[in-house]
């Protein structure tokens, strides 16, 4: 909270995907140093970071920021960690973490998401008597937008995140969600989170934006960004967000939003280097008391509900596609497992015949063991995937059913909007 | 809700760990049939089940119970499932699931807990205008009470469950937690959940209890219970619970609590067999409006706070012991991994020397690969374990810090009670 004018509270928030992977990310240590300097200099209320994969980096930041940001937390999960951490000027009263059920595949080692415990981190703060629930997250990366193998996983994560916030923020006056959603503003993941919780997007709400064109947070002129990935997006992509919601008795406006635009810091050699391959977001939010709305516009409510129904239906369909794929894998790997068993059996059986060279026997057995282990692992992975997607689908189904009961007229609007969207999508393909 | 007298609402709740493991549990199908009959006959408001491992069993129960229990949900997670499901007379408005970060070890295949996605399932119901948050869970089994390798995992699960309920029930009028906590009433897991949320135990609160001695839910005279496991507990153990809490403006009393006491159903051959190796719990809760307490007894509050601090400290210590063990494993398996690398290197290197038989080379390589795979898996498991325990410890530390700030006098009381407990424990050993 920078200043208080009258009864309004100003909250300065910083968000950055730091791209701080030990041994891999370029100029990591220099960039972490620069980030610390920037945070100390700009004096935010809250700094929410993603991809701080090394706890040493977190510790060095913590030491450096201690005079200005007394409170900090690193969210630990998975094998490597969640990469999520937070620095706060205000006392952190409570911390909780929800690890996502689905997060890629263990055999996609080169992508590595599975090994990180991707999660939603939650903090409870009380700022000038306002109870603020802060959430920080990082959803599964999108490696290939044309053939996005992880879409169902990302949508399931988005749903879990939305549900987690929905259920844990009931007592809060304000919700703040920051992070790298790996979803463009038109993508189902972003829309699902935004509509299910009723969040507002600081980029869309602010009157005073300064930064990259279209509010992009990954831009081609950042020297750490692979230009090939930006081929279809010459103006960059917006995948990092500061989203907020006033729950009751408050109104929030985003007074200013700024992004970094590439080179802002100098390394030891005097060269100018970006803070990360993502751009940082810096928002000033003003929180004012407001009368609780009693008589809301019912037409607007029906439209919102219809739009929500459309989004829920879209997410449900996407998960269904993922589920069908996972079930196919369960089936195929089950067969492969039988093949492995057969090979092992042949290996053992051939020991009864002296004319079969023992090299062949050993080969059968080794091959059998490899196929068994491999298909067993894949079988378990696909089984887990199908359980998690089925659960998410069931939760969404219930949400749709309840929404229908609340406002039956929304269903008709929803089916129309859903049909419209489908026809637009098929036309654009 | 069975009946309404004046302004009170009666809720009839059923809880059972069903022990329904396909191919392993004895008389599984007959018992599931009997369970369905009992639930239809007794007409509960809610039936919460654990260890329904086969979705087919859930489906057959669902079909059977449909006329009386219109709403049902099976919580899907992990490789096998969570085993948790619920049948309800009242519309289930919302469903959410939190899978525990820690749940045993993958190499303990014979214990199998790791393969089930142990979780906390949550339901939101509205019964006669009362918003009820219902939770069902099943914590990690205790295979050896003297040398309980899973204690830290179970305590971490208990903490996650307590946090999950604490954060998701803020809007509810009433919280209901049912399940198999695999913890005796004196164990830290049970006390942590009870004290952090402020739950009441239906067995301790009721004036009208009928059932096994001491409210036990696993008793030696149940023919499915291994008598050797009950050697030290001739009166059985109480590890299944119906816990509740009225959040605001309501008062809940447990009018009756009943447990099954062994043989209650007949199989096809006319023999009498128990419903499960656990006993079922059946509670009637009365919910009445009550004035919101304004002036609470501050001495009692300080005592409660002190007791909570003691419990938090005990849980923190237990997790610390688990953490130290996990870190030792990270260290040892790291060394084993190096050994595997060395063996592989020797295997490849020996190919340069013609005098070394190729069988020896192959042996080195196969052994190297086995050691690498094994130690790699163990390394990842221990790393994950240490991250999860560290996170839980950090959350508890923060909870203790905040509790200290709220009531500093509680700290002194807490250290006294904690010291007392330690001395009692060391005397009893």
Image (spheres, coloured by chain):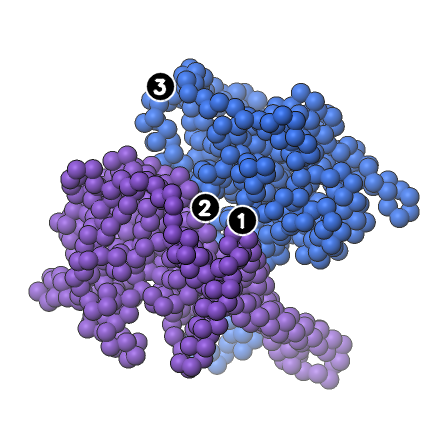
Chain colours: A purple, B blue
Q: Which of the two residues, B294 or B209, is positioned nearer the viewer here?
A: B294
Tell me, yes or no, if residue A325 can be seen here.
yes
- What residue sits right under mark 2 in the picture? A167
Decide: marks 2, 3 in contact (CB < 8 A)? no
- What residue sits right under mark 1 in the picture? B94
Q: CA distance from mark 3 to mark 1?
A: 41 Å
Q: Could you say which disc has been placed on residue B296 in the image?
A: none
Query: For the residues tagged 3 and 1, is the chain the same?
Result: yes
The correct choice, above or below, for A69 with respect to A410 in the image is above
Query: For the residues tagged 2 and 3, is the chain the same?
Result: no
Q: Which of the two residues, B414 or B39, is positioned nearer the viewer here?
A: B39
The correct choice, above or below, for B315 with respect to A337 in the image is above
Q: Would you identify the image quadrant in which residue A119 lies?
A: bottom left
**Residue drawn at the location 43% of the way across and 62% of the way down:** A307
Mark 3: few/some/many CA within 10 Å (<14, 14-19, 20+): some
**Label 1 element class:** strand
């Amino acid at each position: 909270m920078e200043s208080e004018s009258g009864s309004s509270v100003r909250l300065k928030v910083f968000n950055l995907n730091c791209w701080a992977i030990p041994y891999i990310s370029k100029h990591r240590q220099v960039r972490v140093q620069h980030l610390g300097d920037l945070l100390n200099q700009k004096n935010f209320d809250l700094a929410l970071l993603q991809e701080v994969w090394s706890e040493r980096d977190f510790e060095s930041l913590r030491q450096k920021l201690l005079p200005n940001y007394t409170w900090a937390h690193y969210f630990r999960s998975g094998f490597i960690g969640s990469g999520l951490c937070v620095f706060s000027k205000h006392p952190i009263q409570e911390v909780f973490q929800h690890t996502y059920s689905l997060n890629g595949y263990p055999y996609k080692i080169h992508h590595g998401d599975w090994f990180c415990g991707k999660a939603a981190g939650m903090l409870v703060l009380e700022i000038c008597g306002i109870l603020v629930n802060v959430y920080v997250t990082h959803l599964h990366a999108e490696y290939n937008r044309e053939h996005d193998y992880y879409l169902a996983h990302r949508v399931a994560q988005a749903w879990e995140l939305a549900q987690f916030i929905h259920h844990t923020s009931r007592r809060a006056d304000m919700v703040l969600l920051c992070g790298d959603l790996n979803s463009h503003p038109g993508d189902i993941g972003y829309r699902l989170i935004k509509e299910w919780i009723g969040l507002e997007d600081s980029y869309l709400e602010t009157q005073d934006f300064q930064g990259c064109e279209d509010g992009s947070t990954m831009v081609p002129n950042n020297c750490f960004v692979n230009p090939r990935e930006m081929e279809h997006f010459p103006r960059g992509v917006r995948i990092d967000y500061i989203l907020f919601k006033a729950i009751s008795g408050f109104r929030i406006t985003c007074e200013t939003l700024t992004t970094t635009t590439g080179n802002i810091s100098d390394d030891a050699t005097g060269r100018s280097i970006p803070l990360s391959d993502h751009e940082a977001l810096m928002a000033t939010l003003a929180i004012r008391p407001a009368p609780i709305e009693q008589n809301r516009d019912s037409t607007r409510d029906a439209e919102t509900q219809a739009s929500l129904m459309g989004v829920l239906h879209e997410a449900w369909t996407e998960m269904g596609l993922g589920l069908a794929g996972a079930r196919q894998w369960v089936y195929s790997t089950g067969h492969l497992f039988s093949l492995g068993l057969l090979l092992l059996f042949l290996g053992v059986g051939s020991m009864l015949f002296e004319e079969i060279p023992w090299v062949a026997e050993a080969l059968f057995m080794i091959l059998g063991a490899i196929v068994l282990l491999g298909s067993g692992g894949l079988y378990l992975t696909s089984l887990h995937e199908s359980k998690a997607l089925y659960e998410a689908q069931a939760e969404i189904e219930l949400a749709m059913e309840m929404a229908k009961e609340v406002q039956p007229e929304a269903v008709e609007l929803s089916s129309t909007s859903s049909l419209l969207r489908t026809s637009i999508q098929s036309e654009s393909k």
